[in-house]
Amino acid sequence: MAGQIFAYIGYKDGVPDDSALELVAAAKKIADAPVNALVVGSGVDAVCSEVASSYQEVWKIDSDALAYPNAEMIRKALLNILPQDCILLVPHDTFGMDLAPGLSIKLDSAFVPDAVDFEGLDGDTLKVVRQEYGGAVSTHVNCDISAGAVINVRPGAFQADESKAAGGSVVDKSGDAGDMSAGRRYLEIVEAEVGDVDITKEDVLVSIGRGIEDEDNLEIADDLAEAMGAVVSCSRPIVDAKWLEKSRQVGTSGQTVKPKVYLACGISGSFQHLGGLKGNPFVVAINKNPKAPIFQVADVGIEADILDFLPELTDAINEQ
Amino acid sequence: METALIAPASYSFLGIPTILFSILIPIAGVALFTYIMAIRIAPLVLAAPDFRFNRIVERVVKVVRIWLLQWRQPRYKTAGIIHIMIFAGFLVLGIRSTSLVVIGLSEGFVLPGLGGPLGVVYSFFKDYAATMVLVACCLAAYRRIVVKPERYAVPSKYGKDHTSEAVFVLGMISTLMISESLFEASAAVAQARQGLHVEFIAPLSLAWIFKVMLTWASLSTLQGIHIIMYYVHDLVFFSFLCFLPMGKHFHVITSFFNVFFMRIDRGNIKPVRHGVADDKLDDLESFGVKKLEDFTWKHMLDFYSCADCGRCSDNCPANAVKRPLSPRFISIKGRDLVFKNYPLYPYGTPFTKGDDLIGNIYEEDEIWSCTTCGACEQECPLGIEYIDKIVDLRRGMVDEGMVPQSLQKPLRALEKRGNPWGKMEKKRADWTKELPEGCDVKVLGKKASAETLYFLDSITSFDDRMQDIGRATVKVLNAAGEDFGILGKAEKDSGNEVRRFGEEMLFQDLKDQNTDAILNSGVSKIVTSDPHAYNALKNDYADLPPVEHISQYIARKVKTGAIQLKAAEGNGKVYTYHDPCYLGRHNSVYDDPREAIDAIPGIKRVDMEKCRDRSFCCGGGGLMLFYEPEEEQRMGVLRVEMAAKAGANVIVTACPFCLVNIEDAIKVAGLEGSMEAIDLAELVDSHIEA
Amino acid sequence: MEILVCVKRVPDTAENEIEVNSDGTDIERDDLVYSVNEWDNYAVEEAIQIKDNVGGSVTVVSVGDEESEEVVRREMAMGADNGILLSDDAFEGSDGKGIATLLKAAVEKGKYDLILTGAQADDGAAQVGGMLAAMLDLPYASLVNKVEMVDDKKIKVGREIEGGNQEMNEIDLPCVLSIQTGINEPRYVGIRGIRKVASVEIPVHGAGDLGVGADAVGAAGAKVKCLDYYVPELGEGAEMLEGSTDEIVEKLIELLKAKGGLK
């Protein structure tokens, strides 16, 4: 077995991301061994204490220079503190994609992107489950972890481990971080334009995807949303086609929503889309492709063409 | 002959013989006119080639019909009749005006042949013609100034209103009429007063009225009027001549040529470059029209010839739904650019060349907005072409990579899979699986052959709803006892829209593949239920067996009795037939579909106001389904409303794209339940006597 | 600006039904059609636009078998000046690191100010750009959806991050960027464009030309190996509503009412 397992903790406004506890569960599926957390940034004590109970040790790098998490700088810092043969789990989000592949090169360890499950460790060989082609097929990959590994774990793929059974301590590694100067300097965040509706605050969303086929068909979704007292949201292709504004997009590159009820209409259900769906809503999936991955995560599924089904549903609701 | 008044040729004013003016005005006028025309012709010489000196008989027929007899004018009644009055007047008065110019030099001049009784007859008509033209000018000015028909309006984005130019020209024409009449009337009054021979003046004509008005005028007044009016006429005549090539009245000069050279065939698309064979296209440096001089000389002549009458745009469905396209301004903007780049003044200004048209003169969306329905060309009284220009501009855009993202995907899919959805080739014949028992379709190839090929094209092969048309067609063919088959996966998209969207090389590929497959199948004729395929196979492909649209087939088979139809169930259904552009306007198939419908005993059918060659496009087919233009409403919705207005509750189409658009539009218009759409093949299939 | 863009040939997944082949070693490729990875296409367009603005050249490089030449050619038809194909039997079975190693060797054979990759391909890995940057010791930014020229020493880039926000950075040249879709509107490449570059020679570099050891790349050098492909079991998944449309609608409305989905 290779070295120590670490989990990189993502956080926002002093609150750890959901992935912080998901990585505990992920690590347990690799090996039944203590796991350390990495918390990097500026003023991270609150985050450290929040996750301390779930990890054996929380290694923190607290530096004013990291007021914004610049992956280029953090990579340098991590190189100075991480043991060569460690296994590092990183959330596969926009930060993890920025940080991890390069880090694996610098650590000279293996890299597995976007892992959704682990199926056991055999000596130095870790069996990882990944998905390809938008989730249409799964694949097993064997990863040689003898020299360590950096593994990006898909957010939401593992059920968060809430046991908080580790009760660890916070270890300040800030002094070991070394020179973090990088060729890339953070400037600012340009906030996405806020549209006329705030889908993040809605309880019921009628969300449409490629299955709507044509801009003119948006009316079908509008009608249903109106009948239900809901709001229309969408997946990325709809925004790419400029049929709806960016503020309506659910997904990792769009909005994170927490509705009570989510009607996924003609949405195949890529993980980038599902990544924006939080709070365990009641998900109804309507799709004409019975193999659409969305049916895996939905509570209720209907195999139908939304162009036919939604108007029927609208009419029935209006009649009542 | 003795005259009471001194003629302009002999008159002196302050000791200067006025004959000097009679010489100088025409010389200056003709010189200026020649210079202007030379500059105007320059871009035509630099333009792309166009082969139009063929099929002279057909061209003469066009000239007689469309130019001389003004065949298309009465499609707009008021404007058309006014125009015919002015045009006919001009034809008659042209002779008079020309001889008047010579009379200024030699007072006794009479055009050869007009000396005898013919001259008297001519004189009679000429007097009325002048009167008629003046009346028509007044009516036209009234329309321009007071009535202001909507189609003459110029949206601000296209520049200034052209009313003042129109009124100015009407004023000039009126001045010509009045001065000529006064010239003649003054002479007549004077002659009568002196008891000399008086030329006959037609009663109640303009000259006659002036004659009455001048009865009491003194001889010197009459002399003054006679001379002044002569030179007013002379001056205005040459000013008018030189003013014509400055704007929309250039058509007075160019219309004859424009109609002579107009397109004769329909449904076809011009070659990428005249004189370059399809298999030599790869050698061309550039494709399509990118700069002004890439247009053919005929297309530039079109720009000159546009009279700005607005009929094209008035019939353009894209314009009707407020897409950013108005065909009239394709011409006007083109003309303005030619005028700007080839300036008349100051003398010797070098010509400007090389500006990109797209982005400067025309916008991308403007050019993609056209459905190639052909309504504009059908209407133009001057034979101006739009489809070829649009296609040439698109060819240029495709060559530069300027293709909307929404069209790139279907084009790539057509390249790789032969259909715009990228569906697998092997699934092209899957629609046959749902045919009823005993209704088999042969897939032609090594093992199976047939007399007739049923060519489906992509949408009928792959679209769930349109597959019904395919199955209905099969049942109709079966009922008629036809020996037929399909190409299955060997069939590719016909490429009708691929070509019209400017991707010529992809079209050539599709054409070659289909041609090979069709010729290898050994069939002796082809039938199709898709007018776009019909048009492509008939007009864009070469050396294929004869092609028939299913509506023609049905009409034929009903006549021979091979297809027997049972009576329509009454139940209050009123049918109307929507003419698909690629069946009607582009291929003149108007009657067969109607006959096919009417062959169903007891069926009630009405025509919409806009029908036959004025049919209103449903929104376009082929790749148009993938393009999302800016528009205020959908063409289909307008069309469905037209059907409702005609009192129909079933729209019969004979084109899968029309059916897609109209069925959609019925939903959008909220007319589900009160309006439905059906394909002709489906309608006939459901009435076949078992 | 000398720009290198790394591109990959992938199955066109739009209407293709991705299925696993009979022995589970790969997806069923018989009926697939291929094209350039969508993200890479945006990267090439961005490179061409930069070149058009500030001058320089665009080179496209791909790792793959001889069929990958097709996508290199297509990107050249788009406007890239040069194409390079890295192809060798020894490259087969390379993992992300192996591909990055090959690309690094290709980068070092030239002199580039800017190296672009697509943010990801259909395997969703999003790894090669970051690895390549680390191997070259160059600054890196992923998921780039905006590139602005500052001067010949640095540029400004926007990264697409969560919530549709954009993270602006200044980055020193030379650097590696992975490009996100939507950064531009890639131009159309017609058949004519491809034919124009049909006879352009595209150099093919093998292991020897690149000077990479056979054990560093290919299956031999891979620490991550694909074992099999399979269609994920449907597992628990959704409760599928069956019956006539009316019945389904009725059931669904009841469920929606119960869950607070109807107001």
Image (cartoon, rainbow, N blue to C red):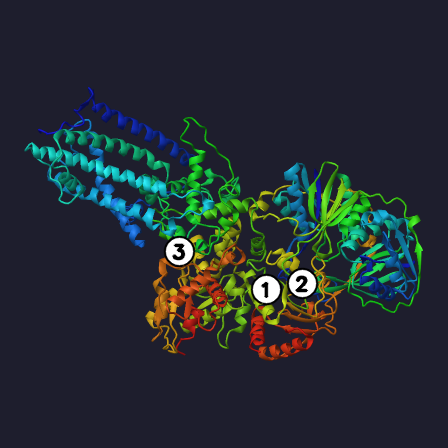
The percent coordinates of residue B273 (x first, y second) are 46, 42
Q: Please tell me the numbered disc located at residue A199.
A: 2
Are labels 1 and 2 assigned to the same chain? Answer: yes
Q: Is residue A259 above or below residue B77?
A: below
Q: How many marks?
A: 3
Q: Quadrant of residue B647?
A: bottom left
How many neighbours does mark 2 have within 10 angstroms: few (below 14), some (14-19), or many (20 or more)? many
Where's the N terminus of chain B, which quadrant? top left
Q: Secondary structure at mark 3?
A: loop
How many neighbours does mark 3 have within 10 angstroms: few (below 14), some (14-19), or many (20 or more)? many
Can you tell which of label 3 and label 2 is closer to the viewer?
2
Kind of residue indicated by mark 3: His
Q: CA distance from mark 3 to mark 1?
A: 33 Å
Q: Is residue C140 above or below residue B457?
A: above
Where's the C terminus of chain B, which quadrant? bottom left
Please name the residue that numbered disc 3 is placed on.
B586
Kind of residue indicated by mark 2: Ile
Are the two marked residues, 3 and 1, in contact with CB atoms closer than 8 angstroms? no
Kind of residue indicated by mark 1: Ile
The percent coordinates of residue A244 (x first, y second) are 61, 58
Taking the image as shown, residue C171 lies to the left or right of residue B626, namely right
Please name the residue that numbered disc 1 is placed on.
A212
Q: Nearer the viewer, residue C261 or B270?
A: C261
- Who's the residue at 16% across and 39% down the image? B210
Taking the image as shown, residue B651 lies to the left or right of residue C47, namely left
Q: CA distance from mark 3 to mark 2?
A: 49 Å
The percent coordinates of residue B484 (x first, y second) are 45, 67
How many neighbours does mark 1 have within 10 angstroms: few (below 14), some (14-19), or many (20 or more)? many
